[in-house]
Image: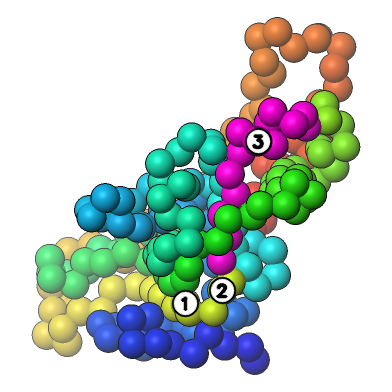
Amino acid sequence: MRTTAPSNRSRLRRKYERGRYDKESLYEILDSCLLAHVGYVLDGAPVVTPTLYWREGDHIYWHGSSASRMLRKSAGCEVCLTVSELDGLVLARSGMHHSVNYRSAMLFGTARKVTRREDKIERMRIFVEQMFPGRWEQLREINEQEVKATTILGMPIDEAAAKVRTGGPVDDEEDYGHPVWAGVIPFVPKTPGEPVPDDRQDPGTALPDHVRNYRVAREVS
């Protein structure tokens, strides 16, 4: 089993039994989420920015405008990237033991800018194809201005930890007889609704499979 050996900053100290360091668990969480938050230092102050991301093998990538201060300042610097998924609210018999079921991952590393034109286009293609298989070939070909206007950062997944909570409440033994409802309110994450066509969509344009099937794919994941 491949692992990301915990470092001093990635090793869990609170609720350490919930920790996961094997890459299979980590990648399962990364592949099931869409939104990450990237923390870095901007002009001496901490900043956290939400962004879409994608994984390619043992690397993770995110992108944005070439004018973005976040991307310009964090390139070549240490960053902390986190993802999380809320799976349920856990109601216990005391306020102290209320909790949530969740899956989360925290990655540390140095953000590196993707500079070669061919590499940038390939990263963009993979990003689109992971979300909507088959769509890239249907799109208008990307132009040079769009390539220049996009910055892509990435880093190897070498230093990371996942944390997971599942199950019901864990009360103090003497509280189990207390007459109040206890249990879990499950959350169904990222359940897409019915596709809504653009106002200027040609009525004769067929709904592609990667849009029709997206809802089913995300519900299954």
Displayed quadrant of residue 60: bottom right
The mark lying in front, picked from 1 and 3, is: 3
Which residue is the site of mark 2? 157
Determine the residue positioned at 67% across, 15% down.
198
How many angstroms separate mark 1 from mark 3 (CA)? 31 Å
Q: Upstream in the sequence, badge 2 or badge 3?
A: 3
* Residue 43 horizontal/vertical position (percent): 26, 50
Q: Upstream in the sequence, badge 1 or badge 3?
A: 3
* Residue 175 horizontal/vertical position (percent): 13, 79
* Residue 142 horizontal/vertical position (percent): 78, 32
Position of residue 110 in the picture relative to residue 92 (left or right): right
Q: Is residue 146 magenta?
A: yes
Determine the residue positioned at 56% across, 74% down.
157
Which residue is the site of mark 3? 148
Is disc 3 placed on a helix, strand or loop? helix
Residue 117, above or below 106: above
Is disc 1 placed on a helix, strand or loop? strand
**Residue contact at pointers 2 and 1, CB within 8 angstroms:** yes
- As shown in the figure, which amino acid type bears the numbered disc 3? Lys
The mark lying in front, picked from 2 and 3, is: 3
Which residue is the site of mark 1? 160
- As shown in the figure, which amino acid type bears the numbered disc 2? Ile
Which is nearer the eye, 119 or 98?
Answer: 119
State the extent of the magenta-drawn residues as a range: 142-155
